Amino acid sequence: KQWYQRRVREVENVAREAIEENRIVGEETDVTKLIRYSEKYSDSQYEYRHVTLPEVISKKVPSTHLLTETEWRNLGVQQSPGWVHYMIHPPEKHILLFRRPIKIS
């Protein structure tokens, strides 16, 4: 009987975790709407912008390397091709800094 009760609790815990995981995934879909994009600004070489992520998404940003385009797109960031994540500012991990070269014609 004790074995059965332990097994029931284990199954309930797994089910609870699965429900919570689905809830988080659903929230993340909506949370991407909270991503904020700055206006573009520039110097003589580059056009810049920064992207502010909500806390739920920023927890997934690695602090060990700059993000590839695939990685930042997988976080929900949407912008035209050519932008490069060029710098990490550790105190503000939730802000991604991007730049792209200015095309001189």
Image (spheres, rainbow, N blue to C red):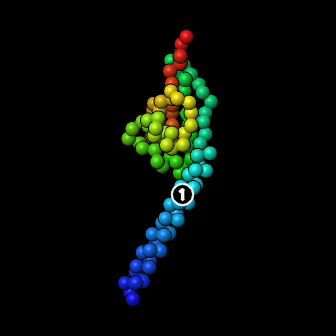
Residue drawn at 55 percent across, 23 percent down: 47
Q: Position of residue 39 (x, y in %)?
A: 62, 30
| Residue 91 in view (yes/no) | no
Q: Position of residue 63 (x, y in %)?
A: 41, 42
Alpha-carbon neighbours of circle 1 within 10 Å: few (<14), some, or many (≥20)? some
Residue pushed farthest bottom? 1
Residue 49 sits in which quadrant?
top right
Q: Is residue 47 above or below residue 93?
A: above
Tell me how many marks there are: 1
Residue drawn at 47 percent across, 30 percent down: 84
Quadrant containing the C terminus is top right
Please name whichever residue, 18 or 42, is drawn nearer the observer in this view of the structure: 18
Residue pushed farthest top? 105
Q: Is residue 59 above or below residue 18?
A: above
Q: Position of residue 12 (x, y in %)?
A: 47, 74
**Which residue is identified by label 1?**
24
Q: Is residue 27 above or below residue 12?
A: above
Quadrant containing the N terminus is bottom left
Q: Position of residue 29 (x, y in %)?
A: 58, 50
Q: Is residue 6 above or below residue 91?
A: below
* Identity, as a three-letter code, of the amino acid under mark 1: Ile
Q: Is residue 55 left or right of residue 7?
A: right
Residue drawn at 54 percent across, 13 percent down: 104
| Residue 71 in view (yes/no) | yes
